[in-house]
Image (tube, rainbow, N blue to C red):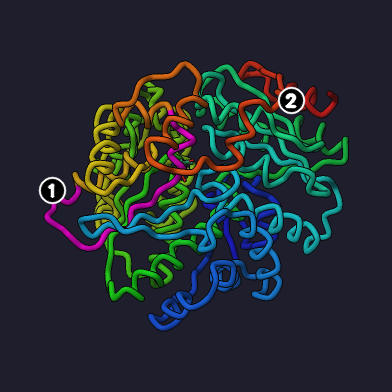
Amino acid sequence: MYVSTRGGEAISASQAILRGISENGGLYVPVSLPVWSREQILALAEIPYADRAAKVLADVLDDFDEEELLGYTRKAYASFSHPAVAPMRPLKGNIEVLELFHGPTLAFKDMALQMLPYLLTASARKQGETREIAILTATSGDTGKAALEGFKDVNGTSCTVFYPLGGVSHVQERQMLTSEGANVHVIGVTGNFDDAQTGVKQLFTSPEFIAQMNAKGRTLSSANSINLGRLAPQVAYYMSAAAEMMKKGVERFNVCVPTGNFGNILAAWYARKMGAPIEKLVCASNCNDVLTEFILTGRYNAARQFHLTISPSMDILVSSNLERLLFELCGCDPVKLSGMMKQLKEEKEYTMDADMLSVLQQTFIGYSADDTATKATIRAAYDSDAYVMDTHTAVAMYAVGQYRAQTGDDLPMLLVSTASPFKFAPAVTDALGLEAKENAFDSVRQLAAFGSLQIPASLGKLETAPTLHTLTCDRGAMGEAVMKAYEA
Ligand SMILES: *Cc1c(COP(=O)(O)O)cnc(C)c1O
């Protein structure tokens, strides 16, 4: 069963997935999680990824069984270009890179968003929902394309993505604007990601907007990581990685995650609760370092300068999923949690009490990397291991160095790699000291030649694909823009 962080009745997984966010603005969290034995986790290492994911999900999502889920995971992960789906690559210094970017849109979002359409349409069936499910999503760059790809031409659904104009990489923007599918829409918003995300959250709680959509036979849901259907598949890859680590004889390890909306690292925390032998969770941020400060001091301060960086998918000041962690840290007290969230909304900041902070710090530690440090790290990883990593992964790699230097803790480290370096080729080639190109696709070719890497097939087609979406809107007019997109 699942409850909203801001209070209310417990509901089933399919209800939580269908609703996306609760009516009181809270996020759905599991009332309890199963705890797996060492043997149970280790056994995952012997079966294919789709089977691993089905086993984990069956234990997390109460009204889905393993056989049903296996039908979905086999289809969802068949679109990945690597047979292991989420392979691990060792680097010097006892680091294992968990590569989560082998899906169709080249970022880790595919791990969840290739699954979400199956979970969502199945949830609709289970709940007797016959209206069209209208997905609304804000993106810092990668969620958008992954959602469009996952939902395109899925019967009974439609998908609208908002992205911050000027706030995503050229490749990310091309990926979205060339999206095919009769049921998908892309809208550029004048504002940053937080504006787009806040706007979407407001639409979900706006009675007028909901009524307008309902009148057209549509019900709303979200593909953002606030949706339980996004979070659950992410827990699976941490259990899978834990199995691989244990199979190599590693009994305890740390995890470092490049973090924005706090969804990925939260999944690691859930896996830890389920028995994965994870010690510390290192939260890596770019110079939008709200989380670094928060983990160090307990003060969440979103009232600060927003920076555009070379790791744009982490350019976020309000990390939605943190609410789920805070809920547990305050003893699952919806009243206390609601108070903190209200304060954040009104004053752009809140401070947690010392008890909560000390529990947080037992597991989490945060570091941040500016663009200069990020580039130097890309270069260093190439020099040391001939490994080309993307800018987001490099932020985490930098944090690993900081963490180890500061604490002396040299436990094996699972470094979570969230995007293909090709997705951010101009920044990566710059970091590697290659000549700057005007066209991002020239940088892609340059990177392939330099690293003797193969250009992912989905990128090859992008350069010449026609632009299919041109709508833009002001951040205050997102509801009107949605209605316009459906009429077009
Ligand atoms: C979304 C994203 C992140 C941040 O993940 P969260 O779950 O939002 O913390 C990091 N790196 C890349 C490449 C992403 O697309």
Can residue 82 be seen from the camera position used here?
Answer: yes
Image position of 272 (left or right of 211):
left
Can residue 12 be seen from the camera position used here?
Answer: no
Alpha-carbon neighbours of circle 1 within 10 Å: few (<14), some, or many (≥20)?
A: few
Q: Which quadrant is home to the N terminus? A: bottom right
Spot occupied by residue 111 in the image (x, y as percentages of width and height): 55, 53
Image position of 360 (left or right of 188):
left
Alpha-carbon neighbours of circle 2 within 10 Å: few (<14), some, or many (≥20)?
A: some
- Specify the segment rendered in magenta: 403-425
256 or 375: nearer the viewer: 375
Q: Is mark 2 within 8 Å of ligand 1?
A: no
Relative to residue 157, is residue 427 depicted above or below?
Answer: above
- Where is mark 2, residue-wise? 468
Q: What type is the residue that disc 2 sits on?
A: Leu
Picture residue at 42% right of the left edge, 41% below the top: 340
Q: Earlier in the sequence, mark 2 or mark 1?
A: 1
Picture residue at 28% right of the left edge, 42% below the top: 382
Image position of 371 (left or right of 107):
left
Q: Quadrant of residue 331?
A: bottom left
Give me the C-alpha separation between circle 2 and circle 1.
Answer: 49 Å
Spot occupied by residue 171 in the image (x, y as percentages of width and height): 54, 29
Mark 1, secondary structure of its residue: helix
Spot occupied by residue 32 in the image (x, y as percentages of width and height): 50, 69
87 or 484: nearer the viewer: 87
Mark 2, secondary structure of its residue: loop
Q: Quadrant of residue 330?
A: bottom left
Q: Which quadrant is home to the C terminus? A: top right
- Where is mark 1, residue-wise? 405
Q: What type is the residue that disc 1 sits on?
A: Ala
Relative to residue 199, is residue 83 depicted above or below?
Answer: below
Image position of 26 (left or right of 154):
left
